[in-house]
Amino acid sequence: MLIIKELNLLRRESSRSGLVMLLMVICGLVVGGFLGELLGKYLPILKYGYNLGISTHEWNFHVLRLTLGLNFDINMFSILGIVLAIFLYKKL
């Protein structure tokens, strides 16, 4: 019984570890994107990037209007932020 409890504890720690990595990657993406847009005024190559996403879809139910869409603007600094976040995660 003790072994099963220890295995469950290890599973919880590994899932939390994945959540920490996901949060760090998202933070690296956001901070890198912000820096890329900010510094893109001075060095235009930093602003170079591409769009990933799903176009917006709209449903009108006459009582409720629902619009869903997802769009990512990824630039050079965003990618650098993701790489740096993964590197920092590995160091922790």
Image (cartoon, grey):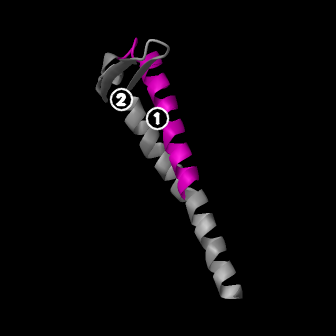
Three-letter amino acid code of the residue under disc 1: Leu
In this figure, which residue is indicated by the disc labeled 2? 74
Q: Quarter holding the N terminus? A: bottom right
Q: Is residue 5 magenta?
A: no
Give the image location of residue 68, x and y in percent: 40, 24
Q: Of all residues shown, which one is farthest toward the right?
A: 2
Q: Is residue 24 magenta?
A: yes
Three-letter amino acid code of the residue under disc 2: Ile
Disc 2/disc 1 C-alpha distance (Å): 8 Å
Quarter of the figure with residue 61: top left
Label 1, residues with CA under 10 Å away: few <14, some 14-19, many ≥20: many
**56 or 12: which is nearer to us?**
56
In this figure, which residue is indicated by the disc labeled 1? 29
At 44% across and 41% down in the image, what residue appears? Answer: 82
At 49% across and 43% down in the image, what residue appears? Answer: 25
Above or below 31: residue 44: above
Give the image location of residue 89, x and y in percent: 54, 53
Quarter of the figure with residue 60: top left
**Earlier-in-chain disc, 2 versus 1:** 1
Tell whether 57 sits left or right of 4.
left
The stretch of residues the image draws in magenta is 18-43
At 54% across and 44% down in the image, what residue appears? Answer: 24
Quarter of the figure with residue 5: bottom right
Report if the CB atoms under discs 2 and 1 are less than 8 Å apart. yes
Dominant secondary structure, magenta: helix
